[in-house]
């Protein structure tokens, strides 16, 4: 006698529970940080982007929101630090997401003193007493995880400020050949002696792709060290990573 065994396989679909987004995922539910110096943990895990929200040129995602009111007029330093998450901080004014005015944003400081926190972001802005500032913390290319937000008011004025920077042509097509580029920048510094301004260009889609440029007094075409117009010609290599590139300026 031959026995035939029938085995019935039952497949059970098991799905992991979706973690809830942070309570301050949306602009409307931003956390109020008050009007004092701030040191607070932050977590943008499972955070999203809202329609119409700034992505700072397409590099940011997974944002969370805060609000801080200036107790006095003066310079304020905002930073976010993490050893694992590449965060981007933004500062705005305005009462609704659609009506926000961007004051500034920063991705990486490229400051040697931040070596322990590879992905530190930091910026300074001039705050007006009683003004409510909206602060965003997002991840580069949607990066998520734990960070720490620090805010200090009445800090010293920055020694270097850049009011504008542009590249021409924009966009540049490097499909068939390298492209001659011109960098234009309006900047000023209170530093004494010769100053070198380094412009760090980084691909938004491939952070390992970078270009480093340097400007000095010889590239200033008008104005003076406190407020000058600078121009620098350089070549963009053929087949360089396509897409958006971000610029970070450092004065030394």
Image (spheres, grey):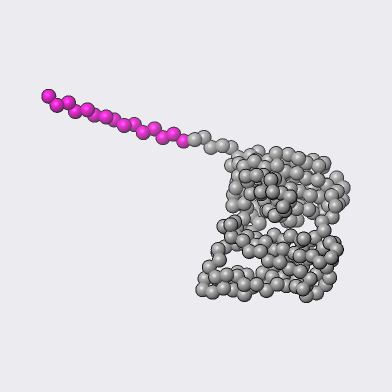
> Is residue 144 at least partly visible in the picture?
yes
Quarter of the figure with the N terminus: top left
Report x, y in % for residue 52. 63, 54
- Left/right of residue 70 with respect to residue 66 in the rendered view: right
Q: Main secondary structure of the magenta part?
A: loop
Indicate whether residue 245 is drawn in magenta. no
> Is residue 99 at least partly visible in the picture?
no
Q: Tell me what residue is drawn at x 71 percent, y 46 percent.
A: 80
In the displayed image of the protein, which residue is found farthest to the top? Answer: 1
Q: What stretch of residues is rendered in magenta?
A: 1-15
Task: Decide which of 85, 34 is in the foreground and name it.
Answer: 85
Task: Decide which of 86, 10 is in the foreground and name it.
Answer: 86
- Left/right of residue 143 with respect to residue 101 in the rendered view: left
- Left/right of residue 79 with respect to residue 210 in the rendered view: right
Is residue 24 placed above or below 156 in the rendered structure? above
| Picture quadrant of residue 221 | bottom right
Report x, y in % for residue 218. 77, 73
Report x, y in % for residue 127. 82, 52
Indicate whether residue 11 is drawn in magenta. yes
Report x, y in % for residue 237. 57, 70
């Amino acid at each position: 006698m031959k026995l035939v065994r029938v085995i019935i396989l039952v497949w059970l679909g098991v799905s992991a529970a979706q973690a809830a987004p942070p309570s301050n995922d949306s602009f409307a539910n931003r956390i109020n940080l008050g009007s004092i110096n701030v040191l607070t943990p932050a977590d943008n895990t499972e955070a999203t982007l809202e329609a119409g929200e700034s992505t700072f040129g397409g590099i940011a995602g997974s944002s969370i929101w805060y609000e801080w009111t200036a107790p006095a007029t003066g310079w304020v330093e905002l930073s976010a630090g993490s050893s694992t998450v590449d965060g981007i901080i933004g500062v705005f004014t305005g009462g609704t997401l659609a009506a926000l005015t961007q004051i500034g944003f920063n991705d990486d400081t490229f400051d040697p003193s931040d070596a322990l926190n590879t992905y530190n972001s930091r910026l300074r802005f001039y705050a007006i007493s009683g003004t409510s500032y909206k602060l965003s913390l997002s991840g580069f290319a949607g990066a998520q995880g734990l960070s720490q937000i620090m805010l200090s008011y009445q800090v010293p004025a920055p020694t270097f400020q850049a009011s504008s920077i542009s590249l021409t042509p924009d966009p540049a097509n490097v499909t068939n050949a390298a492209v001659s580029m011109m960098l234009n920048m309006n900047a000023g510094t209170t530093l004494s002696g010769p100053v070198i301004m380094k412009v760090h260009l980084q691909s938004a889609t491939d952070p390992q792709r970078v270009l480093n440029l340097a400007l000095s007094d010889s590239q200033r075409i008008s104005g003076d060290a406190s407020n000058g117009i600078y121009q620098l010609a350089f070549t963009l290599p053929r087949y360089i990573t396509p897409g958006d590139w971000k610029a970070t300026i450092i004065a030394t």
